[in-house]
Image: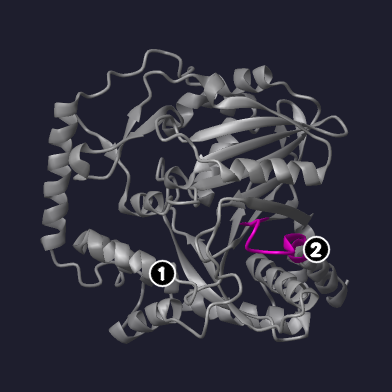
C-alpha cells in the first residue's frame, strides 16, 4: 500500500494553523448573472476527478510518527462543500461576507475546501472558493480555479470530466496498514537525515560559493531593527478590502518608467504607496518596511504538488517621497535578489533542515516568521488572461485573499486574471485601523505612477 503524505513544507504550513490563525486561501470570482448553488454543483461534479485532493481528507498518522496522510473521504458529499452564501448588496457587504468566511476554519475531518455562492447586486454572483494552504499554494490554487470553475473549450472539458467523485471510493486502509506505512516513512526519514546534507540543493541553484550562500540567507533572515506597528498579536476577527486595475496599465507603468520594472515591482511599489498613505493619514512617520515576497518553484508539468515555493525579502522605502524613485529602488533590489538566487538558497536551507531534524525545522520556521525578519507578506500570482467565463457568463473580476499570521496582522495577495490585476487585503479587524486607507492608497499610488510615466 502506498500512502501519500503531507510534504515537509505542507506539514509546516499545517502546523501554523493554531489559536486564531486559520490556514485559509480564498479566491473570489465575480460573475455576471444569477447562478444558483445547484447549477454550480452540477458543473463542478464531473470535474472533481481531475483534482484528487478535493475528495481526500487528512488522516493523522498513528502516534504522530509521520505526517498526516491524504486518504479518500468515503462519505464525500458535494453539497457539504458547495453552499448557498446568501446575499451581499454592495462591495462593502461582499468584503464583510468574505471576512466572515476567513474567520472560520475548514473542517479537518472533511476535504479541505469549500465554495460559497453569494448573490450580488446588478444581477451578479460571487463564487467564493476557500482552500487550506497545506493543500495549495498560490499557483496550485490558481490551477484548481481553472480546473473546477472556469469554462473550458470542448476538448479540455472532455479531458477534465473524468466522472463524479460520488462513485464508490477506494477502501480506506485499516489502522494496522496505516501504522506499517507510517513506520516505513519514519525509517526512511531517519536514513535521509543520516546522509550527507551539507547544502545539497544549493550547488544546483547556481550559488557558486559558500560565502554567497550564507549572504543570501543572511539577507533574508537577519533581524533588522524593531518590529513595525503591524507586529501585533492576532485575534479572531478579520477585515477584507479589494482594489484593482487593468493589467495592461501595470505593464505600461513598468515598461515606461525611467528604470524598467516588472509587474511585481509595480505591485510592490503600489503597496509601498498604500502603506505610506496609511501612515500619513494616521499621523505616523514613514519608514522602511521589509516585506516577504513568495517565489514559486513549481516545475513545468508538475502535478498534485501542494506547496513548492520559497521567498525573497525586499525593502520598501516608505520614507522616499517620490513614487518613481520608490519604484526604481524596489526594481533594483528585486533584480539583485533574483541574480543572487536568494529564493533557491532559502528553499534548500529549509529542505535540508527539515531532513536533519523536525525540531530544528520548527525552530527555523519560527525564526523565519519573526516580525523582525519581515513586516508583511505580499504575494502575486498570475492567472489566465483573455475573455474568461464561469457557467457560461463573463468573469468580471477575480480577487485573492490569504490569511494573516500572528504578529503579521496585514496580508496582501495579488492576482491577475482576465486582463485585471487585483489587490486583496486581509487584516486583523481589531489590531489594524484603516484597512481601506491602505487599499485606497494603493489605488492612488497606481494612478500617480500611471500619470508620471510617458503616455
Residue 260 appears at what percent x and percent y? 69, 77
Q: Are marks 1 and 2 in contact (CB under 8 Å)?
A: no
Mark 1, secondary structure of its residue: helix
Residue 259 seen anywhere in this rendered image of the structure: no
Residue 359 appears at what percent x and percent y? 24, 62
Task: Name the residue: 59% across, 70% down.
Answer: 230
Task: Name the residue: 27% across, 18% down.
Answer: 171
Q: Say which residue label 2 marks.
A: 440
Residue 235 vs residue 331, the one in the foreground: 235
**Left or right, 54 with reference to 365:** right
Mark number displayed over residue 53: none
Within 10 angstroms of label 2, few (less than 14), some, or many (20 or more) residues?
A: many
Residue 317 appears at what percent x and percent y? 65, 82
Mark number displayed over residue 368: 1
Colour pattern of the rendering: one colour
Residue 436 is inside the magenta segment:
yes
**Where are the magenta residues, as a range?**
425-440
Identify whether 120 is placed above or below 334: above
Which residue is at the far top? Answer: 168
Mark 2, secondary structure of its residue: helix
Identify whether 405 is placed above or below 164: below
Residue 158 vs residue 167, the one in the foreground: 167
Residue 210 is inside the magenta segment:
no
**Quadrant containing the C terminus in the rendered view:** bottom right
**Quadrant containing the N terminus in the rendered view:** top left
Task: Name the residue: 77% across, 85% down.
Answer: 321
Task: Name the residue: 31% across, 69% down.
Answer: 349
**Left or right, 102 with reference to 320:** left
**Left or right, 331 with reference to 89:** left
Residue 238 seen anywhere in this rendered image of the structure: yes
Amino acid at each position: 500500500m502506498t500512502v501519500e503524505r503531507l510534504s515537509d513544507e505542507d506539514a509546516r504550513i499545517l502546523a501554523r494553523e493554531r489559536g486564531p490563525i486559520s490556514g485559509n486561501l480564498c479566491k473570489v470570482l465575480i460573475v455576471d448573472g444569477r447562478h444558483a448553488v445547484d447549477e454550480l454543483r452540477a458543473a463542478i461534479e464531473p470535474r472533481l476527478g481531475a483534482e484528487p485532493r478535493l475528495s481526500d481528507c487528512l488522516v493523522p498518522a498513528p502516534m504522530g510518527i509521520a505526517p498526516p496522510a491524504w486518504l479518500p473521504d468515503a462519505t464525500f458529499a458535494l453539497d457539504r462543500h458547495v453552499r448557498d452564501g446568501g446575499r451581499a448588496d454592495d462591495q462593502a457587504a461582499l468584503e464583510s461576507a468574505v471576512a466572515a468566511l476567513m474567520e472560520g476554519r475548514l473542517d479537518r475531518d472533511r476535504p479541505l475546501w469549500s465554495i460559497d455562492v453569494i448573490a450580488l447586486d446588478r444581477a451578479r454572483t460571487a463564487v467564493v472558493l476557500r482552500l487550506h494552504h497545506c493543500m495549495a499554494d498560490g499557483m496550485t490554487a490558481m490551477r484548481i480555479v481553472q480546473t473546477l470553475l472556469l469554462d473550458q473549450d470542448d476538448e479540455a472539458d472532455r479531458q477534465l470530466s473524468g466522472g463524479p467523485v460520488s462513485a464508490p471510493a477506494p477502501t480506506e486502509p485499516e489502522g494496522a496498514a496505516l501504522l506499517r506505512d507510517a513506520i516505513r516513512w519514519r525509517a526512511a526519514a531517519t536514513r535521509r537525515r543520516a546522509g550527507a546534507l551539507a547544502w545539497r540543493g544549493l550547488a544546483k541553484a547556481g550559488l557558486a560559493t559558500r560565502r554567497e550562500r550564507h549572504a543570501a540567507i543572511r539577507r533574508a533572515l537577519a533581524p533588522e531593527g524593531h518590529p513595525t506597528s503591524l507586529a501585533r498579536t492576532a485575534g479572531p476577527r478579520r477585515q477584507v478590502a479589494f482594489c484593482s486595475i487593468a493589467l495592461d496599465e501595470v505593464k505600461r507603468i513598468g515598461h515606461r518608467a525611467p528604470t524598467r520594472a516588472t509587474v511585481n515591482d509595480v505591485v510592490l511599489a503600489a503597496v509601498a504607496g498604500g502603506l505610506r498613505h496609511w501612515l500619513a493619514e494616521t499621523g505616523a512617520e514613514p519608514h522602511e518596511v521589509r516585506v516577504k515576497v513568495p517565489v514559486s518553484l513549481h516545475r513545468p508539468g508538475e502535478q498534485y504538488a501542494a506547496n513548492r515555493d520559497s521567498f525573497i525579502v525586499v525593502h520598501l522605502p516608505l520614507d522616499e517621497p517620490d513614487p518613481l524613485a520608490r519604484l526604481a529602488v524596489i526594481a533594483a533590489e528585486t533584480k539583485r535578489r533574483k541574480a543572487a538566487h536568494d529564493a533557491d538558497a532559502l528553499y534548500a536551507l529549509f529542505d535540508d533542515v527539515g531532513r536533519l531534524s523536525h525540531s530544528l525545522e520548527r525552530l527555523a520556521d519560527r525564526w523565519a516568521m519573526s516580525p523582525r525578519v519581515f513586516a508583511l507578506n505580499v504575494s502575486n500570482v498570475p492567472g489566465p488572461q483573455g475573455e474568461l467565463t464561469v457557467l457560461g457568463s463573463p468573469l468580471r473580476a477575480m480577487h485573492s485573499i490569504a490569511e494573516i499570521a500572528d504578529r503579521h496582522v496585514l496580508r496582501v495577495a495579488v492576482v491577475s486574471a482576465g486582463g485585471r490585476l487585483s489587490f486583496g487585503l486581509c487584516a486583523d479587524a481589531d489590531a489594524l485601523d484603516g484597512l481601506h486607507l491602505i487599499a485606497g492608497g494603493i489605488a492612488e499610488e497606481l494612478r500617480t505612477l500611471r500619470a508620471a510615466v510617458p503616455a
